[in-house]
């Protein structure tokens, strides 16, 4: 767990605990990339020099590598409480046409 003085940094105090701890762990690990969807957390992480991607970015990468069928993953994601900008989702789906069945 992060030290008490680390969690008292002003830019971190306005974040939820999950985002705050994720950033502090990334600092300690000297991480190259941070997975985060919360807009405030993303802004703080980027201000600290981290490259940040979100759930849709991970799904995009996985689809590019043939690890997931993006349209199936998106349909499952739509059944959850995950929120996303519709224009970002639309652009992502355009880049990955549906696979045709043989």
Image: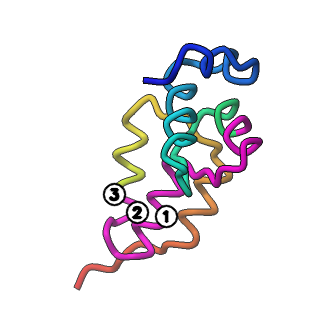
The secondary structure type at the circle numbered 1 is helix
Residue found at x 77% / y 42%: 47
* Mark linked to residue 70: 2
For label 1, the crowd category at 10 Å Cα-Cα, with few meaning under 14, some 14 to 19 and many 20 or more, is: many
- Residue 3 or residue 11, whichever sits in front: 3
- Residue 45 x, y percent position in the rendering: 67, 40
- The correct choice, above or below, for 35 with respect to 101 in the image is above
In the displayed structure, 80 sits above or below 16; it is below
What residue lies at 57% left-to-right and 72% top-to-bottom?
Answer: 95
Which numbered dot is residue 38? none
Callout count: 3
Image location (x, y in percent) of residue 38: 60, 33
Q: Disc 1 or 3, which lies upstream in sequence?
A: 1
Q: Nearer the viewer, residue 87 or 2?
A: 2
Distance (Cα) linking label 2 and label 1: 7 Å
Q: Nearer the viewer, residue 97 or 43?
A: 43
The residue at 57%/39% (across/down) is: 37
Helix, strand or loop at label 2? It is: helix
Q: Are marks 2 and 1 in contact (CB under 8 Å)?
A: yes
**Can residue 99 be found in the magenta stretch?**
no
Circle 1 is placed at which residue position?
A: 60
Counting from the top left corner in percent of width and height, residue 55 is at 49, 48
Q: Quadrant of residue 62?
A: bottom left
**Quarter of the picture holding the C terminus:** bottom left
The residue singled out by tag 3 in the image is 72
């Amino acid at each position: 767990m992060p030290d008490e003085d680390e969690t008292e940094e002003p830019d971190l105090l306005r974040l939820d605990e999950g985002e705050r701890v994720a950033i502090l762990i990334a600092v300690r690990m000297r991480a190259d990339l941070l997975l985060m969807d919360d807009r405030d957390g993303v802004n703080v992480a980027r201000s600290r020099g981290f490259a940040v991607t979100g759930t849709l970015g991970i799904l995009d990468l996985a689809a590019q590598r043939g690890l997931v069928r993006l349209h199936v993953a998106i349909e499952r994601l739509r059944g959850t409480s995950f929120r996303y900008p519709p224009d970002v989702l639309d652009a992502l789906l355009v880049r990955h046409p549906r696979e045709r069945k043989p």
